[in-house]
Image (tube, grey):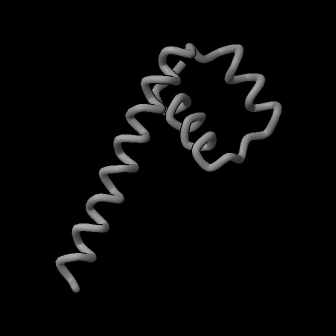
Amino acid sequence: MSILRIAKAVAWSFVGLRSSKEFERDTQQLNPIHIVIAGFVGVAVFIGILLLIVNWAVKAA
């Protein structure tokens, strides 16, 4: 179980595109606690990027 595999599973879940084969493999091999933690980190990064874009857009206007 690698961090990249967990990040990939969370990223594809954010997009909403998962093959059933990959989903089944992930549910059998990945720890749910790691998925939840990676999800929170992903949300924090996403919100941070949105805040940077808004900050840049407001300064540019």
For image coordinates 60% across by 34% down, the residue present is 9
Q: Write down the quadrant of residue 25 in the picture.
A: top right
For image coordinates 62% across by 49% down, the residue present is 15
For image coordinates 55% across by 30% down, the residue present is 5
Please provide percent x and percent y for residue 11. 55, 42
Left or right of 40, for residue 9 = right
Residue furthest out toward the left: 59
* Quarter occupied by the C terminus: bottom left
Please state which of residues 3 and 51 is positioned toward the viewer in this rendering. Answer: 51
Left or right of 14, for residue 33 = left
The total number of labels drawn is 0
Please provide percent x and percent y for residue 43. 42, 41
Q: Write down the quadrant of residue 50 in the picture.
A: bottom left
Residue furthest out toward the bottom: 61
* Quarter occupied by the N terminus: top right
Q: In this view, does 9 lie above or below 12?
A: above
For image coordinates 35% across by 45% down, the residue present is 45
Q: In this view, does 61 lie above or below 10?
A: below
Left or right of 41, for residue 33 = right
Q: Is residue 6 above or below residue 11?
A: above
Left or right of 52, for residue 50 = right
Please provide percent x and percent y for residue 24. 77, 23
